[in-house]
Image: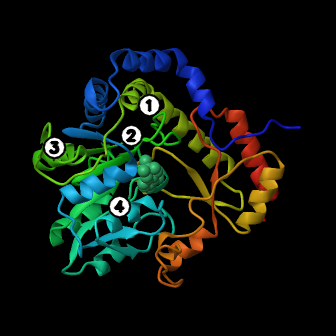
Amino acid sequence: MNDPVPFVDLRAQYADIKPEVDGAIAAVLEDCAFIQGPYVEAFEHAFAARLGARHAIGCSSGTSALTLALEAFGVRAGDEVITVAHTFFATVEAILGLGAQPVFVDVDPRTHSMDPAAVAKAVTPRTRAIVPVHIYGAPCAMDAILDLAQRHRLKVIEDAAQAHLATWRGKPAGTLGDAGCFSFFPGKNLGAYGDAGAVVTADDDAAARMRSMRNHGRVAKYEHDLVGYNHRMDGVQGAVLSVKLRHLDRWTAARRRLAALYDALLADAPVRPVAPPPETEPAYHLYVVELDGRDQVRRALKADGIETGVHYPLPCHLQPALGGRPGALPVTEALAGRVLSLPMYPELPPEAVERVAAALRRAAL
Ligand SMILES: *Cc1c(COP(=O)(O)O)cnc(C)c1O
């Protein structure tokens, strides 16, 4: 019997860095620096420096990062925000939470990310911002998106929740638009030990507003300039993230090697790996293939001890909470039934990739 292959393995990563992480957490407890404070600030500086960003604002999740950025860049009730439905629901929740209207555009069938031609058709006088989602960790077609934004004076808020250290023409995802929103959910490429997120931006005023908004719109103790949120980052998460950031380049390189191995092993298999735009170096949060008979193949792999994922089985516009009808986004809707995410994490042994590829070749129709 072959060894089981999990989809991700957070224990393997913890085992790799346990003394460092345990020491960092103990220091936070010693200092009782539970919320924001020096450990969060140290992480903000390190993260901004690694991305070449002017500001990083730590917050409580990727979802709150999106909310803070959209609001700080002027998205208000009644505004339209152009985004995709082939994403995690949080992208859309952040827009709706501000009373704004998500306007969904279809994705490119090869890259699975925002189709700029569709964005051009979706702009109206009420459009305020575009939220490109760097899905699977591969940056969107940013030249065209930034160009459209400039022409129509729209803000670009990148959902970089899956794209830590991914690049577009050598520039990090998250630093391409007006703001970049990151999630540090434990399973993300840079994962905290609980919920956490961050916004990066070059805009001084927006950065100041976000710092205030994440902490009740506070300027001084019991003095509130704005109506904000409790969207603060915990000290423990800041400390864990600072430790893990030091390993992120190594982990990202490992993901890229494993993706290249999958690419080579699946080159002539009856599956179609996603083709990220050539200007990108993806971070491979996910390694996704497109295939016929997805659910049947997935069951066969599971029976063989191989865990896979589906990102995402039901597009956002068709979620019960939004009540949309099928037909509006043909590429997105077709992909939902055809995408399969293969095991991918930095500690995944190359032999496991070989085993997955061989099993996939046997199971694929
Ligand atoms: C994970 C994720 C989010 C939300 O991040 P949380 O930290 O879970 O709030 C938003 N968008 C995308 C694309 C994600 O993958």
Residue topped by disc 1: 248
Cα–Cα gap, marks 1 and 3: 33 Å
Q: Amino acid at mark 1?
A: Leu
Q: Amino acid at mark 3?
A: Arg
Above or below: residue 78 compared with residue 260: below
Going by the image, does 307 lie left or right of 142?
A: right
Residue 342 at x, y = what percent?
65, 50
Task: Report the side of 272 relative to 49 (left or right).
Answer: right
Q: Is residue 348 above or below residue 27?
A: below
Asked if disc 2 and disc 1 are in contact, CB closer than 8 Å, the reply is: yes
- Residue 123: image x %, image y %? 26, 78
Work out whether residue 13 can be spotted: yes
**From the viewer's perspective, is the residue at label 1 or at label 3 nearer?**
3
Distance of mark 3 from mark 2, alpha carbons?
A: 32 Å
Q: Residue at x 25, y 46 (%)?
A: 214
Q: Are marks 4 and 1 in contact (CB under 8 Å)?
A: no
Ligand 1 within 8 Å of disc 4? The answer is yes
- CA separation in Å, label 3 and label 4: 21 Å
Any part of residue 162 in sight: no
Which residue type does callout 4 highlight? Ala
Disc 2/disc 4 C-alpha distance (Å) = 23 Å
Snapshot quadrant of residue 143: bottom left
Mark 4: few/some/many CA within 10 Å (<14, 14-19, 20+): many
Task: Count the marks.
Answer: 4
Q: How much space separates mark 2 and mark 1, taking CA atoms?
A: 8 Å
Check disc 2 and report the residue beneath it. 165
Find out if the beta carbon at label 1 lies less than 8 Å from the nearest ligand 1 atom.
no
Crowd band around label 3 with a 10 angstrom C-alpha radius: few (<14), some (14–19), many (20+): some
As drawn, 284 above or below 79: above
- Give the residue at mark 3: 218
